Image: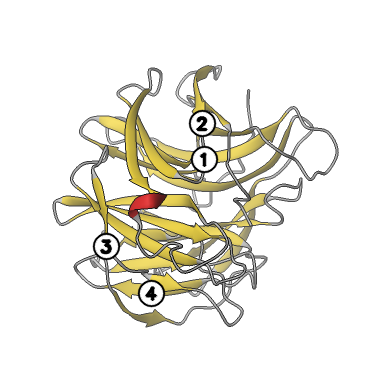
Amino acid sequence: MKCRGAIAAALILLSGAAPAEQVKSIFAGADPSALFADGQMWIEPTGDGNTLESWSSPDQVHWQKRGVLLRLADVSWAGADHARRHFLWAPDMRAANGKYYLYYSVGPQQPTPSRLGVAVCDTPAGPCKDSGKPLLTGGNGFEAIDPMVFVDPKSGRRLLYAGGSAGARLRVFDLAPDMVTLAGEVLVDQPPRFTEGAFMHERNGIYYLSYSTGHWNMSDYSVRYAMAASPIGPWKYRGTLLTSDRKFKGPGHHAFVQDPKTGEWLIVYHRWEGKGGDGPYTDDRKVAIQSIKYDLLGQIEPVRMSD
C-alpha cells in the first residue's frame, strides 16, 4: 500500500543532459507521472492524499507549481458510503481528443476494494472534472491501483494498465475512444516478479513494459522490465533497471518520457535518500529525473543513480 495517510515528500529533480547531474528543484511528491506539452515538461506526483497537483518547467531547471488538478472532496464516489477515510495517489495524465485525462487511485484497499478514477482536464494544469464514477474497482484478489494509459503510436489503440500490491496482478484493458470508459479486458501473461506501477512505452517498434518489484518502503523495491513486439506481449524479460545501492534505497514507481526537443528519453522515478538498512522507511521519498540509454539491440542500460 503506497498511501497510509498524508504524504509529505521532497521531490528532487536531476537533469540527465549535463555531464555532472545537479539538483534542480525541490517540491512535494512521489509516484510521478510525466509528459511534455505546450513547450514544457509537466509532472503530476502523489501529494498529501487530499489533492493531486501539477508542476511544469520549460527547461527542467526552473519549476512552477501550477495548482490543484483534483480534490478528493470533488470525487463524489470516493468515500461517501465508507466509514474509513480514503486517499488519492499514483496519477497518470495523457493527452487525447484535444483534452487531458487524469487517471488516479483511490484507496486504501481495506475495508473496501481500491478503485481507479478518471477526470477530464482542459489543460495539463487543469481544471479537471471527475467522470462521476469509478473506472475500475478491485476485488477477488486484484487491487485496482497505479493506472497507466498508453496510446499506441502505430495502431492508435488505447490501453489501460493497472494493478499490483495485494495479489500483485497486472491487468490490461482497452479504453473506448472517450478515454473514460473501458471497452473490454485484454488477457496478458503476468510479467516475472511484478508487484505494481506498470508503465508502457514504445521505441523503434519495440514495446517496453516496466514495473516495480518488492515493497514500496523497503530496500527491495526496484524497477524491472520486459520487451515485446506488441503492447500486450508476449513479454521477454530483460531484468533490473533500477535497484538500491549504498546511497539510494528503494527506487521505483516510475515513468518514461521523451523530450521532443532533444529526442532524449528520460526516466522519472522516486527513491529514498539518507536511509540505512533495509527499511521500512518513512517520510522523505524523493523523485529524480535521469537520462536513459538503449544498446544496439534496443535493450535499456541499467540506470546508475546519481546525486
Image point 46% across, 73% down: which residue? 137
Q: Amino acid at mark 2?
A: Ala
Image point 46% across, 67% down: which residue? 115
Q: Residues within 10 Å of mark 3 (few under 14, many from 20)?
A: some
Mark drawn on residue 10: none
Gap between marks 4 and 3 measured at Cα: 18 Å
The answer to the question of whether label 2 and label 1 lie on touching residues, with beta carbons closer than 8 A, is yes
Q: Residue furthest left?
A: 98
Residue 132: horizontal and vertical position, in percent?
Answer: 28, 65
Pick whichever of labels 4 and 3 is earlier in the sequence.
Answer: 3
In front: 28, or 33?
28
Q: Amino acid at mark 4?
A: Phe
User: Residue 125 falls in which quadrant of the image?
Assistant: top left
Residue 109: horizontal and vertical position, in percent?
Answer: 59, 66
Q: Residue furthest right?
A: 277
For discs 2 and 1, the disc positioned in front in the rendered view:
1
Residue 114: horizontal and vertical position, in percent?
Answer: 52, 67
Pick whichever of labels 2 and 1 is earlier in the sequence.
Answer: 2
Q: Which residue is mark 2?
A: 28
Q: Which residue is mark 4?
A: 173
* Residue 290 visible here: yes
Q: Is residue 267 above or below residue 95?
A: above
Gap between marks 4 and 1 measured at Cα: 29 Å
Pick whichever of labels 3 and 1 is earlier in the sequence.
Answer: 1
The kind of secondary structure element at disc 4 is: strand
Q: Amino acid at mark 3?
A: Ser
Mark drawn on residue 48: 1
Image point 41% across, 18% down: which residue? 61
Q: Which residue is mark 3?
A: 131
